[in-house]
Amino acid sequence: MRKKALAKDFRMEIRNSLNRFLSIFFIVALGVAFFAGIRASEPDMRYSGDAYFDAHNMMDMKILSTLGLTEADIEAIQAVEGVEKVEPGYMIDVLALMGESERVIHVESLPETMNQVDVAEGRLPEKKGECIIDMDTAASYDIKIGDTLTFLSGTDTELSENLATEEYTVVGTCSSPMYISFNRGSTNIGSGEIDMFAYVTDESFDQEVYSQAYVTVKGAKGATAFTDSYREIVDKVKENVEGISDVRCDIRYAEIMDEANEKVAEAESELEEAKEEAKTELDEAEQELKDGEAKLADGKAELASSENDIREAKNKLYDSRTTLDDGWNQYNNGKTQMESGKAALEEAEKTLGENEAALADGESQIAEAEKNLVEKESELTTAEQGLSDAKALIDGLSTGWQQYQAGMSGLETLKNQLAQLEQLISAGMATPEQIAQAEQLRAVIAQTEAQMAEIKANLDAMEAMRPAAEEALAHEAEIIAGRAELEAGKSELEAKKSELAEGRKQLEAGKEELEERKTSLAEAEKALADSYNQLASGESAYITGWGQVNDGEVQIREAYATIAENEQKLADGWEEYEKGKKEAEEKISDAEIKIQDAKNEIDGIDKPSWYVNDRDSNSDYSGYSDNADRMRAIGSVFPVLFFLVAALVSLTTMTRMVEEQRIQIGTLKALGYSKFWIAAKYVGYALAATLGGSVAGVLFGQKVFPYIIVIAYKIMYIHIPDVVIPYDMGYALAASGTAVLCTMAATISACYRALQAQPAELMRPEAPKIGKRVFLERIPWIWGNLNFTWKSTVRNLLRYKKRFFMTVFGIGGCMALMIVGYGLKDSIMDIARLQYRKIQIYDLMAVIDEDIDTEEKKSIDMGLESDERICSYMDGYMRLSEVTLGDEKKDIYLYIPSELEGLDKFVTFNDRTSGDTWQMTEDSAILTEKAAKDMVVSVGDEIQIELEDNETITVTVTDICENYLSHYIYLAPQLYETLTGDVPPYNCIFADLKEEYEEELTQVGEELLKNDGILTVSYTNNMESQLEDMLSVLDSVIVVLIISAGMLAFVVLYNLNNININERKRELATLKVLGFYDMEVGNYVYRENILLTIIGAVAGVFLGKVLHQFVIQTVEVEMTMFGRNINMPSYLYAIGFTFLFSLLVNLVMYFKLKKINMVESLKSVE
Amino acid sequence: MEAYVKLENVTKIYRMGEIEIRAADGIDFEIMKGEFVVIVGPSGAGKTTVLNVLGGMDTVTGGSIWVDGKDISKYSSTELTGYRRDDIGFVFQFYNLISNLTALENVELALQICRDPLSASSVLKDVGLGDRMKNFPAQLSGGEQQRVSIARALAKNPKLLLCDEPTGALDYNTGKAILKLLQDMCRERGMTVIVITHNSAIAPMADRVIKIKNGKVSEVTVNENPVSVETIEW
């Protein structure tokens, strides 16, 4: 390797000057880390937010309608171009008692796919009456899972008209992408501010139409939230949706109007019916009363006749007594007669019974005899049959045997024939025919033999039965005698039978007679019983008769009472009738009024309008975006200066290094090394340090800075879980590239200058700079009092201007950065306090319904007037109006107080820079500072303000006042009247509480809200704390800035001191040889350092002040102006830190000084 | 007569890892008060080591150095600083003036720290720079700068004036003039002057010549009749 020596020299150079190398390395690393890191923070914040919103499928738009959304509306929205999905839902703001106080809960139906909640504890609601609540506020209101919340309506409408049930069990806690911070939104019930959100299922709602619809937009998910590309996509679709809103609203309006008109018509017809009904009822009642009167008269007449009847009845009763007594005598006679007849009958009956029994006996004997006869006959018949059978068998046997004999003889013949044939055969003389015949015969014989055997067997069997048959034949005579005996028995029986039939006939005749007598007796008995009954009933009728008479007499007495009573009732009835009539008339007129009211109300129904809100109308979301914007603004200014300082210092360091090594360069040149290889060492050195630093800086900075910042923001946005920190190559390359370029350019130009010179020239010490008298020497009284070291110091400082400015700029830059850091904190953190404690000093603002009637307004005023907690109040007009000056347009709040006197209790007008305070006069038009600056308006300019109904007024700006949040143009009411001829349509009330009652602010607000005419109430202390919360996040960011600036300050100071000492080693060694103590040598150096630090710090104060103004104006977002102030402590902190670092560096340097070898002084000048 | 400066077996060993370098390997010599001494020797012989230890800029490894009855080899670094401050005047080869101070101020710089200094301007006049006092070093020639350097050393009124190759960076004539100045100072003020040089040609002008070779004193010559520098040619 040709350049081995050079390579080694390069390595040794790095090792020997490690602290210089590391200085550059760290300065570049810090600069690059800060630049690339802070710059990347803003996109990283957006990425983190976007990742979270995408993961939770956050809606892109929310559509609200003043009269609700119908299914048809939802379909229409779905059909809009660019709409990906629509999810309709319900929502309502309700009140609930938590602990002692009433809280406002925003209840919403759980969307299916959008705005997905993260369940922290428990589960999602699954059925009616369950809810999942806001995890952030659940704890602060001490609500646990399992608790039951009872919702109350915050308006006149019954809760049941909107919700299916009032009681909700908390089943879980959650966070929602719609509420990423602490803001829950505002409402028109309760305190005016929502305290908590809750999600329930659709069934928990009981509403006819949807209250809102969430919409996602095609392609929006792909874009990063908060970016312009996202907004562009959504805005286009938003316009489309707004495009259909008019048509949909018209339809909805028509629908509602139709329905309402129908209802009114219905009510009217109902009223007619009711009128009719009432009339009928009244008429009927009248008729009834009249009828009652008639009836009463009738009753009276009837009563008289019934008294007569009773008298008659009594007479009748006396008569009937005599008749009854006669009847009883007759009855007793008849009864005696009948009893004797009954005894005779019983006698006859007994005789008849005896006869009948005898007859029955005879009959049964005959039956017995008949039965015996039948038995005997059957026996006889069987015997006769057996006899004939036996005879047949014996005949059969004899014939059989004869046949058998004949058969056997036939067989014998056949056998003989066969024998003859066989003889022939055996003799061999037989013809073939004969042989065949023999064969045939043999077969016939065999067959016949078998048949004969069978026949014999049969005959043998029959022969076995022969003895029995022969025995039967022996009894034949006996049987014939039996038959004759039987015939005689039969005829005897027939005679007896006819005898008995005669007896039976006689008995039947006796029975009949008896029956006849019985019947006549029974009839007589019945007649007797009848007459008894008649008598008994006559008797009871008699008793009843008397009872009736008595009752009748009682009834008559009662009737007299009743008549009196009824007479009273009738009188009452008439009275009631009159009353009812009057009532009915009243009711009818009431109903008529109501119908009229309803008609008026219908006339009052406004055409509905849609509110198409994109994500930016969610204040948490837009707040996050604002914060990212602020971060970008900080990133656009602050790191540049930081980087500038870093680049400058490393540049200086490299230049110094080349200059220090003149002799080495000269030597190498003399040795014949090419310029390229000589320069390569320094360029390589710079490149290694810068590139290394850049890489380290990017790797570190782009992870750590965004991480710290996003984490800091998570204090406020606790639910954004994903810190997405990708490396941002753009910023990384920009920062690294610039750093490398700076140092490389510096190194190359330094090398170029050195290399242009001749080697000999290089090897000679550089001609020292001509000593020059500095201007201070011309002031003897200063110069004369300086000792030599001071003189030397002063001359040193003033002669090496480059070093001086580099150091001053380095220290001043870091100091400025720290001042900017602290200053940002001062300016930003103060605005909430300034805005609400110094400028807008009222405590609450209530927005009044535009359509409020004077009566109600009066009662509200009375309430305020009599409230002892309120110090003062005033009506005002407030409206966001477009203000124009030339081409400049801006949305500014037009604010018109109702009076000028006492206005200073609500708003302070003053000039920020001069601090002058002034009062509003009758022709005042005061514009706030930031608006004036943005629009380039100055006092005396004429601006146009657009009013409601597109009317425009032109006013001359009379003053410009301090203001931090939003923009206002304050107009005197008199001026407005002159310009428009009208009194301003006051739409809000400002109130200021007495100091001792300030804690009761919310209560005052709640009481105010109970008035129907009050729409919302907002409190300045809430706005102040919200703003402070939001800005407090910047606090941690600022800490990052301050620490980074401090670190840079330290490294820069170290590096500059290091250079200073390295350059002056020889001088310091000489001093040592001259006998200076270490401390004296140190002082010699320190004096310079301290002076430089002081000068740098002074420069830093000015630079910081200027830079702060610049940064603060860049950081400002459209709606806010930050303070322009840097408080004294901030300067002190910055100065303190700078000096502390300086001290630390000097301490480190002391040891380095101690190490300087005196032998250095003997070396030749380099 | 008691020796004013006395080195006894002075050794100085530098350790460079494994290797020991014996820069001074037992040096012994004596110098009387008011003598003009020239220490000569080739490069690397140990002259500078002698200068360093004698000037209190370095400590010895062994042996002792007596200056005006005090053993400075036992001094701490603070005592050594005091020794340099009060007892030693140093003349460098490259003058080592503070470039931001005028000639006068450079002299005064040294004076402000010592006990009983001489008047800076009179010393500067003595060295022949009466009219260049207000000039900065860069405005002076090499010889003039060396004169300032000598004035700075003399003004401290030291016990010893140590000169390290005082003519090394100067041309012949200027060098001669400087040596003349030193010799005159020695003679006129009774100052003990030690000149360290590799140029043995100037040995005749010295009262005592100490030759050093390989870390040892090879020869000490006491010159009974030193000649004036003008008569020496090299």
Image (cartoon, rainbow, N blue to C red):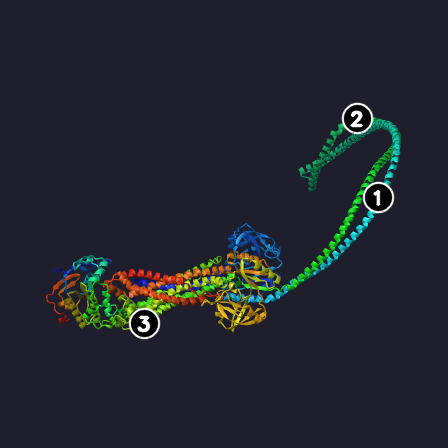
On whether disc 3 and disc 2 are found on a single subunit, the reply is yes
Q: Which three-letter amino acid code belongs to the residue tagged 2?
A: Ala
Q: Which three-letter amino acid code belongs to the residue tagged 1?
A: Ser
Can residue A191 be spotted in the picture? no
Which sits in the foreground, A472 or A937?
Answer: A937
Please tell me which of labels 3 and 2 falls first in the chain. Answer: 2
Q: Crowding at label 3, few (<14), some or many (≥20) Cα neighbours within 10 Å?
A: some
Expressed as whole percent of the image width and height from the top left, the position of residue A344 reads 88, 28
Vertical order, A239 against A537 (above or below): below
Expressed as whole percent of the image width and height from the top left, the position of residue A1050 reads 35, 62
Is the C-beta separation of discs 1 and 3 under 8 Å?
no
Expressed as whole percent of the image width and height from the top left, the position of residue A809 reads 36, 67
Please identify, in this view, whether the residue under mark 1 or under mark 3 is nearer the observer. 1
**Which residue is disc 2 drawn over?**
A474
Quadrant placement of the C terminus of chain A: bottom left
Quadrant in the rendering for residue A585: bottom right
